[in-house]
Amino acid sequence: MITRRALLANGAKVAVGTVYCGTLVSFLTGCSSSDDKDAPIVEILPGGLMVVDPVLCVGCRRCEIACSWSHGKSAVSPSTSRIKVAKNLNFGPHGVQANYQDQRGEEGDSTIVPSTCRQCDICMTVCPQEAISVHEETGARVVNDELCVGCGYCADKCPQQVITIDKTTRKSLKCDLCEGKPNCAQVCPTAAIKFYTWEEAVAEVEHHEKYLKLV
């Protein structure tokens, strides 16, 4: 049985999913960028995880802009986004390798590997100001700007390296799941961004670990 700690420690298996073990199955809520009023809405449940399917991601970076724009506290820029596409855009999650042509990213096999917050407790644990707490409704770890002093401890210790310090406001920027309606998922034109409940995220990783032993 994979524990929450084990899943976080091996976050790449969830964060990059299909990069290593084929298409993730049993995605939950669908999402659409269509203007259709009947288009599905992504709802967040307590303790869940946002997951990106790299096979579907085309690197348009609309999610970064939507995230930055919707929070509206600083510049609208990928640098202030809580979801990171550019970080792995060119050479994938491992950076430039000697055989980069065979790796992920635009300079490799063209598979884009966005990074999303795993909503773990590490940032909350290391914050000396106790400025990060759990949102009761969504389960997201959220930053209290009144307490945050921009020390950067959370950003330095983030396993996924998706927390940044806003250069303008000097506050920590991390995913808060948009109070239950994540804008990144709403605007994704390929429906690459999905939501798992925690139990199903664990089940999917277990499924793929078993699959890898068979191939």
Image (cartoon, rainbow, N blue to C red):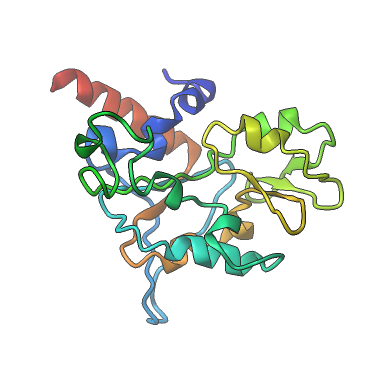
The quarter of the picture where residue 94 lies is top left
Task: Note whether 82 is above or below 187 in the view shown.
Answer: above
Using the image as rendered, state which of residue 42 and residue 127 is in the foreground: 127
Q: At x 43% / y 68%, what residue is drawn?
A: 187
Residue 115 percent across, percent down from the top left: 45, 44
Quarter of the figure that contains the N terminus: top left
Looking at the rendered structure, the number of numbered marks drawn on it comes to 0
At 26% across and 32% down in the image, what residue appears? 20
Please identify the quadrant where the C terminus is shown. top left
Left or right, 185 with reference to 127: left
Percent position of residue 179, x then y? 64, 58
> What is the x, y in percent for residue 196?
44, 45
Q: Looking at this view, name the residue that lies furthest to the front.
A: 98
Instruction: For residue 41, say whether it is visible.
Output: no
Is residue 47 placed above or below 192 in the rendered structure? above
**Picture coordinates of residue 81, whole percent (x, y):** 56, 57
Camera-side residue: 157 or 133?
A: 157
Residue 152 visible in the picture: yes
Residue at image point 40% right, 35% down: 14
Residue 4 relative to residue 99: left or right: right
Q: Nearest the camera: 27 or 105? A: 105
Identify the residue at horizontal 33%, vertical 38% (top origin). 17
